[in-house]
Amino acid sequence: MKPFRPPAGDYASIQTLRQALADERLRAGAAALFSGAAVATAAVVGARSGPTPTHPKTAAWYARLRKPPFTPPGAAIGAAWTVLEGLLWFSGYRVLRAPASTSRTVALGLWSLSLLGLGGFTWVLFDRKQLGGALGVTAGMVASSAGFVGAAARVDKAAALAGVPLALWVSFATILQEELWRRND
């Protein structure tokens, strides 16, 4: 039996075809849509568990926790996340538009991990009521967001700069979460 050989033409082998596809940048519209859908999904998943008026038992549980004096009010947290989600969209869009490379793949993986943390944190803290587990999620988000900034800097400087506020915010959130855990364990 003869080995499979792709038909002759522009692409002499499957490997050449794979390389050609890998070299393509994501088109602007597709990158915007994908980045927006990913961030929106993480935000919706995260909002499903938060201490909002639609979750009065969760809001009451959170209100009873002993919090450090540097805990921001809920409105400030909401405003901060609105800005951070916009920056997450922008940074994802920019990296998706960059030429394919190992650094781009690493940056997108770390960006995705940050989005998983965004959705996972509220589930761990508010649904599961695991203060220590939520600390683990925020610490993971520090690693993924800081790693994203470093990886994105090799791909797109604007994307890296847009990732800095998230890295700073989740660093603060980790300190806050450690205090919540310590005061309420």
Image (cartoon, rainbow, N blue to C red):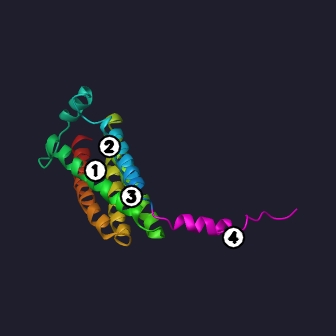
Camera-near label (1 vs 3) is 3
Is residue 120 within the magenta segment? no
Residue 130 seen anywhere in this rendered image of the structure:
no
Say whether residue 128 is left or right of residue 166. right
Residue at 38% in and 63% down: 95
Label located before the other in sequence (2 or 3): 3
Pointer 1 with pointer 2, Cβ within 8 A: yes
Q: CA distance from mark 3 to mark 4?
A: 29 Å
Camera-near label (4 vs 2) is 4
Label 1, secondary structure: give it. Answer: helix
Residue 8 seen anywhere in this rendered image of the structure:
yes
Which residue matches tag 3? 28
Residue at 36% in and 44% down: 42
Label located before the other in sequence (1 or 4): 4
Residue nearer the viewer, 47 or 155: 155
Q: Amino acid at mark 3?
A: Ala
Q: Please give the range of residues in magenta.
A: 1-25
Label located before the other in sequence (1 or 3): 3
Residue 147 is situated, as x and y percent measured from the top left of the image, at 36, 64
